[in-house]
Amino acid sequence: MKKVICHGCAAVVEDIAGQPHKYIGTTQGCWNLYGQILVKEYSEYNYPELTHRLTVDTYAVQHPGQPGRQAIQSVNGHLAGLYFVLVKNTSGKEATERISEILGKDLKFSWLEPPVPNGRKTVIDVLNATSQEEHERNVREWAEDVWTCWYKKHGQTIERLLLESLSRHKS
Ligand SMILES: [Zn+2]
């Protein structure tokens, strides 16, 4: 099978025809691997909430797509998810609630130019896991790797956005 470099995460994946998602900027080969991760989490691992939150958020920000309303909302929302779990140590459930609160507000999200590299770990590293414990560790390492790249480049913007959402929460 011919290989191709995923334009989102730069992983070398199978070159399969298809446009897997409307605004998540990924390749079919990479999307299929992401699907395998989700299947593991939903079935084998009985839906580990915190890890699943990290998986979804990390994949989305590592495949930001092109500037456009949905992609902008998606990247901002998923960055907020990573912030709550990795910086604020919230539960997966709390992060999910906070993301929908933020997205429900009339905040001015802007396109954040993706960092280069956008993390060095990918779905391929995550899929190496042979146990749930290892899977959860791999997902966290992947999430921290990608988050660190975004935070270095856009940390101030992300924190400003979250502060703004908190101040509107109180009023
Ligand atoms: Zn990818």
Image: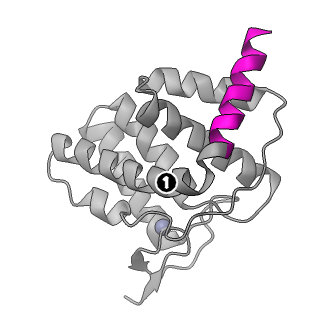
Q: Which residues are magenta?
A: 157-171
Q: On the rendered structure, is 134 left or right of 91? A: left
- Using the image as rendered, state which of residue 99 and residue 86 is in the foreground: 86
**Residue 161 lies in what quarter of the image?**
top right
Q: On the rendered structure, is 31 left or right of 169? A: left
Residue plotted at (80% across, 58% down): 68
Three-letter amino acid code at the position of disc 1? Tyr
The answer to whether 171 is drawn above or below residue 100 in the figure is above
Residue plotted at (64% across, 42% down): 158
Q: Quadrant of the N terminus?
A: bottom left
Residue 23: % across, % down:
69, 58
Q: List the single residue furthest toward the bottom.
A: 2
**Residue 137 lies in what quarter of the image?**
top left
The answer to whether 15 is drawn above or below residue 129 in the figure is below
Residue 104: % across, % down:
76, 27
- Using the image as rendered, state which of residue 30 and residue 120 is in the foreground: 120
Q: Judge: label 1 CB < 8 Å from ligand 1.
A: yes
Residue 123: % across, % down:
37, 61
Where disc 1 sits, the SS reads helix
